[in-house]
Image (cartoon, rainbow, N blue to C red):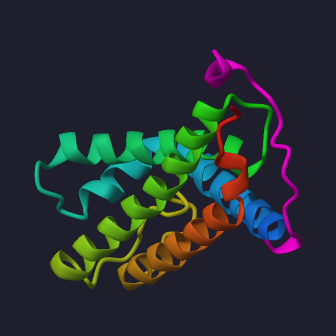
């Protein structure tokens, strides 16, 4: 069971990959912790996006944001993981950015004048909704670049 044995990634990474990884770690930790600290106020903010399905969909989105934020960190931190979980963590990292892109597209279509995005929980209530889509695109670009730069960490041992 070589896929279940944890080990540190052996490949060397360049400084850009490490800088980008640690920058993403700081951003994701700040976002996830602030969302979890104000989760009772985050749900009405996500409900104001007027997602199809109403409150149940908003609860699923809040759950996915928190879960993907937490499970994306092991790949970024290059922790001692099994190769299968490392791939899972890299996949979750990119899914986290895709969720923000989809929320940005939805807000741009349905409620462009919305104030309060929930990116940092309810701490920053004055962030306009037209910031969500560019933020999601930049975040996705950074996560794809980081996944590409750290692709040697994703290889399975034979």
- Residue 115, how many percent across, how many down? 37, 77
Horizontal relation, residue 80 to residue 50: left or right: right
| Residue visible at 36% across and 79% down in the picture | 129
- Horizontal side, residue 121 vs residue 82: left or right: left
Q: Residue furthest left?
A: 53
Query: In front here: 122 or 58?
Result: 58
Residue at the image position 65 percent from the left and 34 percent from the top = 83
Q: Is residue 38 visible?
A: no
| Camera sees residue 78 | yes
Q: Nearer the viewer, residue 77 or 122?
A: 77
Q: Give the residue drawn at x 83%, y 64%.
A: 18
Residue stretch in magenta = 1-16
128 lies above or below 47: below
**Residue 48 rendering spot, x and y as whole percentages:** 25, 62
In the rendered image, the vertical position of residue 102 relative to residue 3, given as above or below: below
- Most extreme residue toward the front, as rendered? 158
How many numbered circles does the render carry? 0
Examine the residues drawn in magenta and state their main secondary structure: loop
Q: Going by the image, does 14 lie left or right of 82?
A: right
* Residue 50 % position (x, y): 17, 62
On whether residue 4 falls in the magenta region, the answer is yes
The quadrant the C terminus occupies is top right
| Residue depicted at x 68% and y 28% | 82
Picture quadrant where residue 78 is located: top right
Residue 104 versus residue 37 in the image, above or below: below
In magenta stretch: residue 10: yes
Report x, y in % for residue 123.
57, 61
Quadrant including the N terminus: top right
In the image, 47 versus 155, the foreground residue is 155
């Amino acid at each position: 069971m070589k896929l279940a044995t944890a080990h540190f990634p052996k490949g060397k990474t360049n400084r850009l990959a490490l800088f980008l990884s640690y920058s993403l770690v700081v951003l994701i930790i700040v976002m996830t912790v602030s969302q979890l600290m104000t989760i009772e106020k985050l749900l009405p903010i996500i409900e104001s996006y007027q997602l199809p399905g109403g409150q149940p969909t908003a609860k699923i989105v809040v759950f996915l944001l928190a879960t993907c934020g937490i499970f994306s960190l092991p790949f970024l931190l290059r922790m001692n993981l099994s190769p299968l979980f490392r791939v899972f963590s890299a996949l979750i990292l990119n899914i986290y950015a895709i969720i923000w892109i989809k929320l940005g597209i939805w807000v741009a279509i349905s409620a462009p004048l919305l104030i309060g995005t929930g990116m940092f929980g309810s701490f920053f209530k004055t962030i306009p909704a037209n910031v969500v889509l560019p933020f999601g695109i930049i975040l996705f670009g950074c996560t794809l670049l980081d996944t590409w730069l750290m692709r040697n960490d994703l290889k399975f041992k034979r």
